Image (spheres, grey):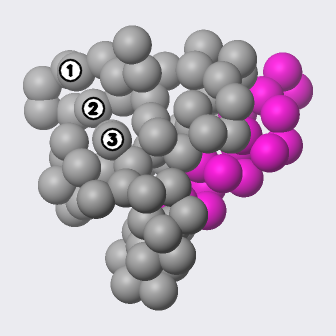
């Protein structure tokens, strides 16, 4: 499972960031944004991003959370991943 629901928060688990593929991270991030209504995201503390996390996974998470309010970014992502 990608998510752990802790009312009223949704969490992207560190183990998913550490072991998942870039595609896993993309799917988990977009699902998290959908689950929280795209309103507010607190992107990790030092415990989530550490030397065992690949740069690609960390940057994927960061870029999605940083740019999810940009319609051009969202449209490009949806086209790339066929998200609806």
Q: Give me the disc on residue 6.
A: 1
Q: CA–CA distance between discs 3 and 1? A: 12 Å
Q: Nearer the viewer, residue 14 or 20?
A: 20
Q: Which residues are magenta?
A: 49-65
Q: Position of residue 60 (x, y in %)?
A: 66, 51
Q: Residue at x 52, y 75 (%)?
A: 76
Quarter of the picture containing the N terminus is top left
**Can residue 30 be seen by looking at this rendering?**
yes
**Can residue 41 be seen by looking at this rendering?**
no
First in sequence: mark 3 or mark 1?
1
Task: Please say whether residue 62 is one of the residues in the magenta stretch.
Answer: yes
Q: Residue at x 68, y 39 (%)?
A: 22
Q: Nearer the viewer, residue 53 or 26?
A: 26
Per the image, label 2 sits on a secondary structure element best described as strand
Q: Is residue 20 above or below residue 28?
A: above
Q: Is residue 61 above or below residue 5?
A: below
Q: Position of residue 9 (x, y in %)?
A: 22, 33
Pointer 2 and pointer 3: residues touching (CB < 8 Å)?
Answer: yes
- Residue tagged by mark 2? 10
Q: Residue at x 43, y 57 (%)?
A: 82
Q: Is residue 34 above or below residue 21?
A: below
Q: Residue at x 87, y 27 (%)?
A: 51
Q: Position of residue 47 (x, y in %)?
A: 64, 24
Q: Give me the disc on residue 32.
A: 3
First in sequence: mark 2 or mark 3?
2
Q: Is residue 21 above or below residue 2?
A: below
Q: Residue furthest bottom?
A: 72
Per the image, label 1 sits on a secondary structure element best described as strand
Residue 6 location, quadrant? top left
Q: Main secondary structure of the magenta part?
A: helix
């Amino acid at each position: 499972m990608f998510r752990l629901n802790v009312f009223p928060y949704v969490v992207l688990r560190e183990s998913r960031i550490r072991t998942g593929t870039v595609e896993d991270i993309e799917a988990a991030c977009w699902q998290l944004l959908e689950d929280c209504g795209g309103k507010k995201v607190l992107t990790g503390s030092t415990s989530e991003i550490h030397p065992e996390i690949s740069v690609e996974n960390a940057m994927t998470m960061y870029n999605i959370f940083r740019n999810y309010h940009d319609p051009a970014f969202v449209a490009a992502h949806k086209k790339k991943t066929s998200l609806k």
